[in-house]
């Protein structure tokens, strides 16, 4: 389920309710912005499970989870203990764990006003640039969001 509705995006972009011709483009832009957010920053706005490949044992035994906000992590049927450090979730890796391995992360979406505003801004930018402009959206967009959050992951 999208964290932002077409109606919210239309309102933010000041597109009148009677103009529904752009609704499909807005819907695609919402999905693209949410995927871009997660891929570029690691922050998730939709609940679900994600996997993280772990090549080798973390030096301190704590694995920074690549997707946030994490509510649980496991290797197969083995649950991992989560530790929060500076607002980010880490998993305590068992000393007996063999590597490489895959960790399953359960992400619980939370309402974050900054991320919602960033998504709305990105959606408007994507919709306004659809095919009419040859300049790609700024690649540093989500890096700036991470700096504002103070919690860069990706």
Image (spheres, rainbow, N blue to C red):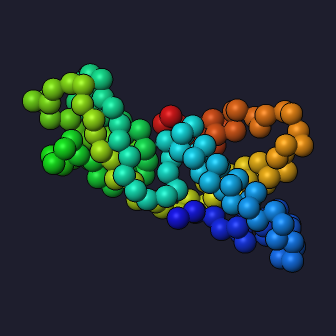
Q: Is residue 98 above or below residue 24?
A: above
Q: Position of residue 94 (x, y in %)?
A: 15, 35
Which of the two residues, 48 or 154, is positioned nearer the viewer here?
Answer: 48
Q: Position of residue 28 (x, y in %)?
A: 68, 55
Q: Quadrant of residue 52?
A: top left
Q: Residue at x 87, y 77 (%)?
A: 18
Q: Outermost residue toward the bottom?
A: 18
Q: Quadrant of residue 104?
A: top left
Which of the two residues, 143 or 97, is positioned nearer the viewer here?
Answer: 97
Question: Is 62 positioned to the left or the right of 26 in the image?
Answer: left
Question: Is 72 positioned to the left or the right of 135 in the image?
Answer: left
Question: Is 2 positioned to the left or the right of 29 in the image?
Answer: left
Q: Is residue 65 above or below residue 6?
A: above
Q: Outermost residue toward the left?
A: 96
Q: Residue at x 76, y 57 (%)?
A: 25
Q: Residue at x 41, y 38 (%)?
A: 66
Question: Is 99 positioned to the left or the right of 13 in the image?
Answer: left
How many marks on residues? 0
Asked if one can make out residue 38 in the rendered structure from this viewpoint, the answer is yes
Q: Position of residue 39 (x, y in %)?
A: 54, 39
Q: Quadrant of residue 10?
A: bottom right
Asked if one can make out residue 85 in the rendered structure from this viewpoint, the answer is no
Q: Outermost residue toward the right?
A: 132
Q: Position of residue 23 (x, y in %)?
A: 76, 65
Q: Is residue 60 above or below residue 123?
A: above
């Amino acid at each position: 389920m999208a964290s932002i509705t077409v109606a919210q995006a239309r309102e933010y972009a000041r597109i009148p309710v009677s103009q529904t011709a752009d609704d499909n483009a807005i819907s695609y832009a919402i999905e693209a912005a949410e995927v871009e957010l997660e891929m570029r920053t690691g922050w998730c706005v939709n609940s679900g499970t994600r996997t993280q490949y772990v090549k080798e044992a973390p030096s301190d035994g704590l694995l920074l989870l690549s997707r946030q906000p994490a509510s649980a992590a496991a290797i197969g049927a083995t649950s991992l203990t989560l530790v929060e450090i500076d607002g980010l979730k880490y998993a305590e890796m068992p000393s007996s764990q063999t590597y490489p391995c895959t960790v399953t992360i359960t992400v619980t979406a939370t309402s974050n006003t900054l991320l919602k505003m960033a998504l709305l801004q990105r959606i408007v930018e994507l919709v306004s640039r659809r095919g009419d402009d040859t300049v790609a959206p700024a690649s540093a967009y989500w890096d700036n969001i991470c700096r504002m959050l103070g919690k860069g992951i990706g």
